[in-house]
Image (cartoon, helix red, strand yellow):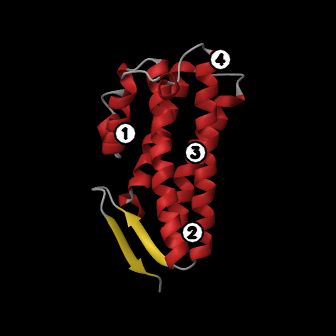
């Protein structure tokens, strides 16, 4: 079931995080960025779900939709990086901010939205944007790993919530 895939769970985190970020820090009217960011986050989530479902019958479609999800992640990543630049804020990885390591560890270890719920309302725009940059980076690595294994071996690959990789032969 695709809802147990870590990268799907992270896509849900990213979608919810993006909605919260846009509501709190971007103008409500007159800025297409809000719609584009929310749609990119939604696209990531929906393409993983659709790719996983369609992957039961077509490996080619699954790989294509996972590629679209990666592209949507990249688009969203650029939006968050642009926001930080426009506001004169720092991307923690780039400036070697000491808080980056704990953020990285948290994002790698947690893939469910429930784990993030209490943190998000307390975060300022710089913190939330940096988390929104880290989540898709981790998610994209998981998607790329699964896609590579599928492509090279003709296998179904699932990375489930506990971090375990489940591999089965294509029908």
Q: Secondary structure at mark 1?
A: helix
Q: Residue at x 59, y 67 (%)?
A: 63
Q: Judging from the image, what secondary structure is the residue with disc 3 in? A: helix
Q: Quadrant of residue 27?
A: top right
Where residue 106 sits: x, y (%)? 32, 36
Dot placed on the residue nearer the N-terminal end, 1 or 3? 3
Q: Say what secondary structure mark 4 lies in.
A: helix
What residue is rendered at 49% in x and 33% in y? 132
**Left or right: where 14 falls relative to 3:** right
Q: In which quarter of the view is residue 86 placed?
A: top right
- Cα separation between marks 1 and 3: 15 Å
Residue holding disc 4: 86
Q: CA distance from mark 4 to mark 3?
A: 20 Å
Q: Is residue 36 above or below residue 51?
A: above
Mark 3 = which residue? 73
Q: Determine which residue is flagged by label 2.
A: 62
Query: Taking 125 as reference, is 65 left or right?
Result: right
Q: Position of residue 81 (x, y in %)?
A: 60, 28
Residue depicted at x 64% and y 41%: 75
Dot 1 or dot 4: first in sequence order is: 4
Residue placed under numbered mark 1 in the picture: 107
Q: Is residue 58 above or below residue 123?
A: below
Q: Is residue 33 visible?
A: yes
- Which is more N-terminal, label 4 or label 2? 2
Q: In terms of sequence position, does the residue under pointer 2 or pointer 3 come before the other? A: 2
Of callouts 4 and 3, the N-terminal one: 3
Is residue 170 positioned above or below 49 on the image?
Answer: below
| Mark 1 and mark 3 residues within 8 Å of each other at the beta carbon | no
């Amino acid at each position: 079931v695709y809802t147990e895939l870590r990268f799907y769970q992270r896509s849900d985190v990213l979608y919810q995080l993006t909605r919260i970020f846009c509501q709190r820090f971007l103008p409500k009217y007159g800025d297409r960025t809000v719609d584009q960011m929310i749609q990119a986050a939604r696209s990531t989530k929906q393409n993983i779900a659709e790719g996983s479902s369609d992957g039961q019958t077509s490996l080619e479609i699954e790989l294509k939709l996972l590629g679209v999800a990666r592209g949507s992640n990249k688009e969203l990543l650029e939006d968050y990086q642009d926001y930080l630049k426009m506001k004169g804020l720092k991307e923690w990885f780039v400036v070697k901010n000491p808080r980056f390591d704990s953020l990285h560890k948290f994002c790698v270890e947690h893939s469910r939205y429930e784990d993030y719920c209490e943190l998000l309302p307390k975060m300022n725009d710089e913190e939330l944007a940096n988390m929104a940059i880290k989540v898709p980076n981790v998610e994209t690595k998981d998607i790329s790993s699964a896609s590579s294994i599928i492509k090279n071996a003709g296998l179904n690959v699932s990375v489930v919530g506990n971090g375990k990789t489940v591999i089965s032969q294509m029908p």
